[in-house]
Amino acid sequence: AAGCSAFRHCRTNIVTVAVSDLDFVSWVRLGDLCTVRSRVVFASSKSLDIEVVASAASAASIEEDTVVAKGLFTFVSLGSNGKALTVPKLRLESDEDMRKAYAQRPRDS
């Protein structure tokens, strides 16, 4: 899911350069319906961070989804020569997007 979001943002070849967080917070039971969502939460000139959230819901009940895993993946966009390309700027469309982008990091300027 993270790779799909990275590709849709960059529209080029992309490569995972880091998995900085990966937390398994609950389990998935046999027969549960699983959903994996990802979205770009930060973009610098050379890399982008993708937040991934996996959730599960019982197929037999109408309970809310339970988050079972969360992760933060960093990608770099690559040109045909294998060198890093400039990553397109991130459009922040909501207050939530803004909060996540600024909370992510200024670790690579």
Image: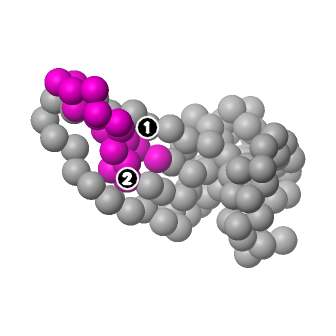
Q: Return the residue at label 2.
A: 69
* Residue 108 horizontal/vertical position (percent): 77, 72
> Does 77 appear in magenta?
no
- The reply, left or right, for residue 92 in relation to residue 73 is right
Q: Which residues are magenta?
A: 53-69
Q: Which of the two residues, 98 or 6, is positioned nearer the viewer here?
A: 98
Distance Cα–Cα, label 2 vs label 1: 9 Å
Q: Residue drawn at (32%, 59%), measured in percent from left and top?
A: 25
Q: Is residue 51 left or right of residue 6?
A: left
Q: Is residue 59 above or below residue 96?
A: above
Count of numbered labels shown in the rendering: 2
Question: Residue 33: x, y in percent?
Answer: 28, 29
Q: What is the x, y in percent for residue 11?
A: 74, 32
Q: Which residue does the image show at 70% across and 67% down from the upper left?
A: 103
Choose between 105 and 100: the one closer to the eye. Answer: 100
Q: Amino acid at mark 1?
A: Val
Q: Is residue 25 left or right of residue 89?
A: left
Q: Residue at x 48, y 66 (%)?
A: 21
For label 2, the SS is: strand
**78 or 80: nearer the eye?**
78
Please check the rendered image and state whether residue 60 is part of the magenta-colored stretch, yes or no.
yes
Is 61 placed above or below 104 here?
A: above
- Sequence order check: which comes first, mark 2 or mark 1? 1
In the picture as drawn, the residue positioned furthest to the bottom comes out as 107
Where residue 23 appears, as percent x and y from the top left, is: 38, 62
> Image height check: is 87 above or below 58?
below
Residue at the disc numbered 1: 36
Residue count near mark 2 (Cα–Cα under 10 Å), binned few <14, some 14–19, many ≥20: some
* Amino acid type, mark 2: Ala
Badge 1 marks a residue whose secondary structure is strand
Q: Residues within 10 Å of mark 1 (few under 14, many from 20)?
A: some
